[in-house]
Image (cartoon, helix red, strand yellow):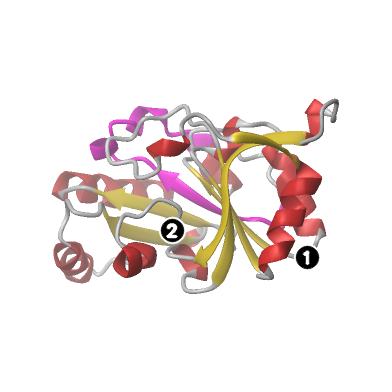
Amino acid sequence: MAPGADAESRLRISEIFLSLQGEADAVGWPTVFVRLTGCPLRCRWCDTAYAFEGGQWHGIDDILAQVAQHGARHVCVTGGEPLAQRRCLVLLQRLCDAGYAVSLETSGALDVGGVDARVRKVLDLKAPGSGESARNRWENLALLRAQDQVKFVLADRGDYDWACAVLREHGLNARCMVLFSPVYGELAPADLAQWILHDKLDVRFQLQLHKLLWGEQPGR
């Protein structure tokens, strides 16, 4: 970024890269990922801890130029926790204005009320096994739209039972798509699938496609 550029139009970015979307309703689509630096949470199983710090400052115009170079229609703004940088809201709006299909991956610990209505929010509610369930901002659930998704990443049977209780208490199925996925390397996918089938849950089971393809490589 050029010296003297407007500090109000820049964000700290860990990486911008092209891959296949590995999760949620856009799974499988070629997607440009814009990973913002920083996160106030420390989930026990976090797979992007390298984005907690570091990164480089980029102007929003520069970010859009880099996204355009990849030639994909889908863009995912992720982290870290992208909403920890307040100018993330501006970036989301600019991406939508440019005609991209935009999704936001957020922990749900921060207010999503200012997110552009065109953005598909993927809200990751933290189960007890993450160590951060006390940080869930439950007020966000009332702001979800039909296009949004709630994701539960589950480490064990206790997490599963907790997620089922949240599902019932908040009527999440009536609001949007609900996703259940196992913590990679901890909960056997077949176990979670069997629990969902046994309980006849109206949720979507998912695995992280990118990890099936490339393992735990950063930036995939």
Left or right? Give the position of 117 relative to 139: right
Residue 143 seen from this side? yes
> Residue at the spot x=62%, y=35% of the render?
56
Image quadrant containing the N terminus: top right
In the image, is residue 20 above or below residue 64? below
Q: Is residue 19 above or below residue 45?
A: below
**Mark 2: which secondary structure?**
loop
Quadrant location of residue 193? bottom left
Magenta segment, which residues?
A: 116-139
For label 1, the residue is 99
Circle 1: element type: loop
Q: Position of residue 73 (x, y in %)?
A: 67, 70
From the viewer's side, name the closer residue of 42 and 12.
12
Circle number at residue 220: 2
Q: Closer to the N terminus: mark 1 or mark 2? A: 1
Q: Position of residue 188 (x, y in %)?
A: 15, 60
Q: Is residue 72 above or below residue 113?
A: below
Crowding near pointer 1: few (<14 within 10 Å), some, many (20+)? few
Q: Position of residue 121 (x, y in %)?
A: 57, 53
Amino acid type, label 1: Gly
Magenta stretch contains residue 108: no
- Asked if labels 2 and 1 touch by Cβ distance under 8 angstroms, the answer is no
Q: CA distance from mark 1 to mark 2?
A: 24 Å
The amino acid type found where label 2 is placed reads: Arg
> Percent x, y for residue 8?
80, 29
For image coordinates 57% across by 66% down, the residue present is 31
Between 87 and 144, the residue placed more toward the observer is: 87
Whether residue 205 is visible = no
Which disc, if any, is residue 128?
none
Q: Is residue 210 above or below residue 183?
A: below
